[in-house]
Amino acid sequence: MIEAYLMHEKERNAQGIPALPLTPEQAADLCDLLQDPPAGQEEFLMHLFTERIAPGVDPAAEVKAAFLADILKDAKSSPLIDKKKAVQILGTMIGGYNVQPLIDALDDNQLADNAACALSGLTYVYDAADQVVELAKSNAAAKKVVESWANAEWFTNKPEIPETITVKVFKVEGEINTDDFSPAGDAWSRPDIPLHALAMGKTRFPGGIEEIAKWREDGHQVAFVGDVVGTGSSRKSACNSVLWHIGEDIPVTNASGDVVATFKIKPATVPDEYRAGGRIPLIIGRSVTSTAREALGLGEATLFSKPDNPTPKPNQGYTQAQKIVGKACGVDGVLAGTACEPQMTTVGSQDTTGPMTADEIKELACLKFQSPMFMQSFCHTAAYPKPADIKMHHTLPQFIAEREGVALRPGDGVIHSWLNRLLVPDTVGTGGDSHTRFPIGISFPAGSGLVAFAGAMGFMPLDMPESVLVRFKGKLNEGITLRDAVNAIPYYAIKEGLLTVPKKNKVNIFNGRILEMEGLPELTVEQAFELTDAAAERSAAAGCIQLSEESVATYLRSNIALMEKMIEEGYQHPDTLRKRIEAVQEWLENPQLIKADANAEYAAVIEIDLAEITEPILACPNDPDDVKLLSEVAGTPIQDVFLGSCMTNIGHFRAAAEIWRGQKFNPDVRTWICPPTRMDQEKLKEEAYFSVYSAMGARLEIAGCSLCMGNQARVPDGVNMFSTSTRNFDDRIGTGARVYLGSAELGAVTSNLGKLPTPQDYLAVYQEKVAPKADEIYQYLQFDEMEGYRKSA
C-alpha cells in the first residue's frame, strides 16, 4: 500500500499537483498498518491518516471513523493513536460518521472534555444536535457543547475578514467565459480539482497559471480581472480552478493608493460567510446555534449580520417570479434585493459536475436528500465515455439512489429535457447546469456546492434578483420560428440600448436579473422551454414564462405516464417518483397558475411585436449576444450543421426531415443529428425519419448533449458551423470554429446548400416542405396517448 501510494504521489507531483485522497480500500489497509506500523514509517502513516482521507460521509471517512471508534471501545489499538488522540482526530472530520462516536465519548469520564471540545467545533451534525441537547440535561460535557454552540464559538474562533488585502492584478482583456477557466474538453477531470486546474486558460490566456504561480512564489496575493468574467455554466468547477491558483478575487487600489475599483458588499452577510468558511457553513452553523439557544432558553443570537431586506409598499405588486419564490418561502411575494431561503422542490445534477456534487454531498454529511426530487443525468458523457466517465456511470447512480434520488441512465438524454418532465408547477428548483431553466415554475442554476446543499437540505439561499419583462405580442409569421423569437430578445434589447455586443464597458440589462416573459400563453411547455432555456445566454439569473393552465395540464398528464413507466422499468428511487406523481395529480385537481400583478415593477420592459419579424435571426460567431438578420450573413459557407441540444424537441427533427426528403446528400457538409431524449429518438425511428437522415448522410448521435458542450465530439478546427445548440463561445465546439446559432429549420436548408441561404430561399423551402404539414410535424410527445405508456398510465 505504501509503495503504491508513493508511486502515485510521485506521478502527481511531477504534474505539480498533490496526490488524490485515499480510497476506502487504501484507508482500510492504512488502518491495518497503524495497528503495527513498520519502523520508520510512523510519521508518514499518520500524515496519510490525518491529512489524506476525505471528510464527511466519504466511504473512506467511514472506514477511518469506524477504526477510531474501535480504538475508543478497546476493540482495536495503535501505538500511534491513544483514545484522546482518536477523539481529537474525529473532531477534524467535519461531520457524518464521526459524530456518533464523539457523542458516545461524552459519557466517558476520561474523554468527555476532549469530546466536548471536538463536538463544539462541529456544525454538520443535523439531527444529532437534538441528541446532544437531550444528553445535556444530565451530562456536564454535553452541556458544554450546547453552550458553545449557543455562543457560536465555531464562528467566533475564526478570523474576521481582513481590513486590507494587498494584491497584484492579473488582467485579461475582453471576455473570459467560464469555459476558459474550466474547459469543456477537460470536463472529465473536474472532480479532481488540482488536475482540472492545470487546464485553466490554456487557450484564452496560455502561460497564465505559470505567471500567477511565479507571482505567488514572490509573495504576492493575486486578483484576476477582465472586462467580462465567467459567462456560462460549470461555474463551480471554474471557481475551483481560480481558487486553486489564486485565492480571493477582490477590488483594489493601485500602488499609489488611488481607488481603481469600488463595490458594495451584497448581501450584508458576506463578511460572516467569509469568516464561517462559506455561505453554506454559515447557514448550517447558524441553525445549530439557534437550536442550542432555544434549548437553553436564550434569545436570538446578535453576533450574525442580518440582511437588509426591502420592505413591501402598501398594496405591493409582485412579478410572476417574485410570487413563485414567495410561495416557496411561505409569503405572498419576495421583492428584489431580499435574502431568502426558498424550498427547493426539484434539484438536477448533470454528469460533468455530478461527481463534484457527490463529493460535496459527502462533505455535508448527507445520507438522505431533503429535496423532494433530486435527479442525476448522464447526458454529457454517454456518447464517448472516458475511463473516468465509465467509473462514474457505474458508481454515481447507486450513490444517488441510496439517498432516494432519481438516477437516469446513460443514453436517456439531456438533463433539462428530462428534468422538465418531473416538475410541479409554480415551484422553485436548481441544477448544476446553467440551462436548468424551468418552463413551469422557476429555477436558479447554481454551482455544484449549492446544488449539493439544495438537495441535502431541501432549501437554498437566494438573493432575489430584479426582473426584466419581455412582453411578446402579435403572431409569428410563417417560417419564423421560436428560435427566432429567442434571438429577437437580444436583437430588440440592442435596438433599445439595453444590450451591447463589445465586452469593454458592456451593457447587459439581463445580467444577473430574472428574464420574465408573457404574451405567448398558447405555447406548449416544450416550446416554452426554448425561451426560458435561452435566458442562460442572456446571463440572466433565471427565467420564467406565463403559460395557460390547459397547456401545462396537458404536459403534466403526459409526464405522469412517463414517471409510471420509469417505475415499471426499475428506475430508482421508486418512492420518490410515486410522491412526485402524487404532487402532480394534486395540482391537476385544481389547475391554477401564478400570474404577475398588474402593478408589478421591473428593471426594464421590452416589447416585441412578432409580426415585425419577417426573416430568421441568428446569433453570429462567436457570441450569443451578437445577433443579426439572416439577410446580413446570407451566403456564408458552412461546413458543419448540428441539430440537437436541449434547445430542440421532436418537432424540429421532423421539420428538418421534411426539408431533406428527396434531397441528395451534400458531401461538403457534415450533418449531425442528436435528439434530446431516447424517447424522441425512438419515436422518430418509429416514424421512419431515420431513413431520411441516412439518405442525407447525417451522423446520428446518442441522445444527449453531443457537440453542444464540446467535451465529446468536436468539429474540425476553423470550420464555419451552423448549430441549434445553446451557445457559441470561442473554441467550445471546435478549436477556432465560427459558429452561428439558429433554428433547426434554417439548419436543414443550410445543410442542403452548404451555405446560409437568403431569406427568400429559406422561406420558399419552408412554405413548400414544412408549412403544409405543420400540424403533423409539430406534435409533441404525449406519453399518456402513446402505445407502451398507456398501460403504465
Image: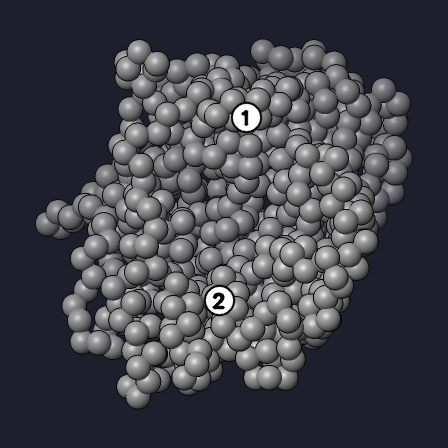
Residue 16 picture location, percent across and down: 68, 34
Q: Residue at x 32, y 40 (%)?
A: 161
Quadrant of residue 125 within the rendered picture: bottom left
Q: Is residue 713 above or below residue 788?
A: above
Q: Is residue 345 above or below residue 185?
A: below
Circle on res. 88 = 2
Residue 671 picture location, percent across and down: 80, 30
The amino acid marked with disc number 2 is Gln
- Horizontal relation, residue 409 to residue 464: left or right: right
Residue 285 picture location, percent across and down: 35, 61
Q: Is residue 719 above or below residue 577?
A: above
- Residue underneath mark 1: 217
- Horizontal relation, residue 717 to residue 170: left or right: right
Residue 561 seen in the current view: no
Q: Residue at x 59, y 69 (%)?
A: 81
The amino acid marked with disc number 1 is Glu
Quadrant of residue 195 within the rendered picture: top right
Q: Is residue 782 above or below residue 100?
A: above
Q: Residues within 10 Å of mark 1 (few under 14, many from 20)?
A: few
Residue 605 picture location, percent across and down: 31, 31
**Colouring style:** one colour
Q: Residue at x 65, y 80 (%)?
A: 76
If you read the primary sequence from the N terminus, does the residue marked by circle 2 or circle 1 appear first?
2
| Label 1: which secondary element | helix
Tell which of 107 and 330 is nearer to you. 107
Tell which of 352 and 238 is nearer to you. 238
Tell which of 563 and 736 is nearer to you. 736
